[in-house]
Image (cartoon, rainbow, N blue to C red):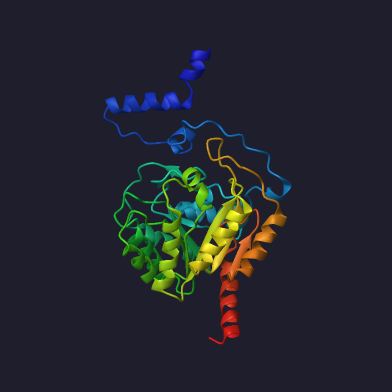
Amino acid sequence: MAVMQNWYSPPLCTIVMQCYQTIRGEKFVRDLKIPDQRHPEKAHRPDNAQPKKPDWIRVKAPSGKGYHETHKIMREHNLVTVCEEAGCPNAGECWSQGHATMMIMGDICTRGCTFCNVATGKPEALDVFEPGRVADAVQKLGLNHVVITSVDRDDVDDGGAEHFAQTIRAVRHRSPGTTIEILTPDFLHCAPEVLETVVAAKPDVFNHNLETVPALYPSVRPGARYFHSLRLLQRVKELDPSMFTKSGIMVGLGEERQHVHQVMDDMRAADIDFLTIGQYLQPTPKHHVVDRFVHPDEFKAYEKAAYGKGFLMVSATPLTRSSYHAGDDFERLREARLERLAQTGA
């Protein structure tokens, strides 16, 4: 019986099926609902126990007319959302209000960060019609503010910079009154000029997440470089000083408080306007372990410290995510800038 159970376990079944299809000359199509096919780079990792969530982490299950209408529009336009792919705990609340974060350039990422639930592997070619579908969905949802993110596309020469620019322009054309926030990859393996392509398309907010403190990059974000990401955001400000910049980190990965404060200082040195800090939640036992659940009082302390360091906007709560309440936060961000300009007489 033990032999039969091993034979029918997903990893071995997957290997056998791939070999069979290869012999027959068929193309193997991964089922991203199967963990070992979704995250082949994590399949060999030992399981990490997933601790019970405290009361302040719990959220309601998705439901309601608004949620289902948003889901319908996403499916009709064949669009991917990071809300679903990353397993965001706030998806039910946001979708019920007609808000969804579009994830362009496919649902397979070329990186294998240990915290992330987005599938890893070799993506399909970029879809030239996707920018138009995103713009149409934004218009149908009637969004005042939209967040557009993407997977990493290290397989594309410009990292998808032109695709981002085309999507921004398409949304501007269809919904000129909608403000646009982008959450980009790091363009690590691209020529420096590709960033100019994205900035020239004039998003209202340029977001790129540092994700964690530099000491944890080798274990949490092994394909990225902390100071490259920091410099990317600094260059956005150099290219367009009027553009809002934003970045975020997760806590509960094993960082120390002084490390978080150092990241804040680094961000302010790069002139980043908006900081988000949220609790890391472990998607599966194969992902990076949750070191601890940070108490809401500690988040409040981080918020107070960040404002003291000069950020225009700070969102620091256990359930904070990059695009959570992004529209309301953008309005507050603009007001904060106007208030600071008035104080300085600039």
Q: Horizontal placement of 242 versus 61: left or right?
A: left
Rendered location of residue 133, percent (x, y): 40, 59
Rendered location of residue 164, percent (x, y): 38, 61
Report the residue at 36% width, 64% height from top.
Answer: 195
- Looking at this view, is 33 or 160 the one in front? 160
- Looking at this view, is 250 or 204 the one in front? 250
In this rendering, the answer to whether 219 lies above or below 335 is above
In this rendering, the answer to whether 176 lies above or below 21 is below
- Dividing the picture into quarters, in which one does residue 184 lie? bottom left
Report the residue at 68% width, 43% height from top.
Answer: 53
Rendered location of residue 259, percent (x, y): 58, 54
Q: Is residue 199 visible?
A: yes
Q: Horizontal placement of 294 versus 30: left or right?
A: right
- Dividing the picture into quarters, in which one does residue 108 lie? top left
Q: Horizontal placement of 123 versus 210: left or right?
A: left
Report the residue at 33% width, 24% height from top.
Answer: 20
Report the residue at 55% width, 32% height from top.
Answer: 47
